[in-house]
Every structure is written in structure tokens, then in C-alpha cells.
Image (tube, rainbow, N blue to C red):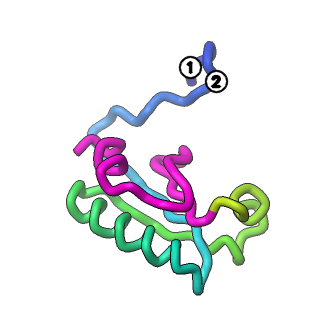
Amino acid sequence: MDAMFGRTKKKTDAGPRTVTLIGKPGCHLCDDARAVVEAVCAETGARWEEKDITQDEELYRAYWEQIPVVLVDGEQHTFWRVDAGRLRRELGA
């Protein structure tokens, strides 16, 4: 953690990155985000997972007004719309 700015440092080891998509069923923006995340992760070799905000009270409280939300290695990357180029850059591609 960078004590001066209160930020965690980006993952630098050679292991695969993990992208987490937080959304809910029936959300068209979540569907759009899923397509981008799937494609970019397939290109870059990153792992990805999806979490349903309606099944997790903590996620609901934290992100309800922002879904879909994309995390990279546990840190919020974006919300509402996912830019494929920006996600690729974040993943080091």
C-alpha cells in the first residue's frame, strides 16, 4: 500500500489478473459489460468472474447505483460502461 496516497499498488507478479464484473440479472448495461469483459479477458489471458449484486448485501450497499461495476484485482476499474481499450491497458495488453 502506498502510505502517502492510501492506494494499493498494481499487481506486478507474472500471475494472471482477475477481472470481476458486478451486476444483476436483466440489466442491459451488465450484458454489454459482460461481452466486453469476456472478449478482453480472452485476448489477454486474464481470469474473470461475475458477481450478482442482488445476492450479496455488501456489494449491494457499495455499488447499487453504479452497476455494472468492473474490478481488476479487487480494485474498482470502472462502472456503467466498459471501454475495451482502457481495460486492455489496465491488464497490460
Q: Position of residue 53 (x, y in %)?
A: 67, 71
Q: Residue at x 62, y 13 (%)?
A: 4
Q: What kind of residue is marked 2?
A: Gly
Q: Quadrant of residue 3?
A: top right
Classify residue 3 as left or right of residue 81: right
Q: Residue at x 48, y 28 (%)?
A: 9
Under tag 1, what secondary structure? loop
Q: Label 2: how many residues lie within 10 Å, few (<14), some (14-19) or many (20+)? A: few
Q: Residue at x 74, y 55 (%)?
A: 62
Q: According to the image, label 1 marks what residue? A: 2
Classify residue 37 as left or right of residue 44: right
Classify residue 40 as left or right of residue 21: left
Magenta region: 67-93
Q: Position of residue 22 (x, y in %)?
A: 57, 65
Height in image: 61 above or below 75? below
- Per the image, is 88 magenta? yes
Height in image: 84 above or below 52? above
Cα–Cα gap, marks 2 and 1: 6 Å
Q: Position of residue 1 (x, y in %)?
A: 57, 24
Q: According to the image, label 2 marks what residue? A: 6
Q: What kind of residue is marked 1?
A: Asp
Pick the front one: 84 or 10: 84
Under tag 2, what secondary structure? loop
Mark 2–mark 1 contact, CB under 8 Å?
Answer: yes
Height in image: 51 above or below 3? below
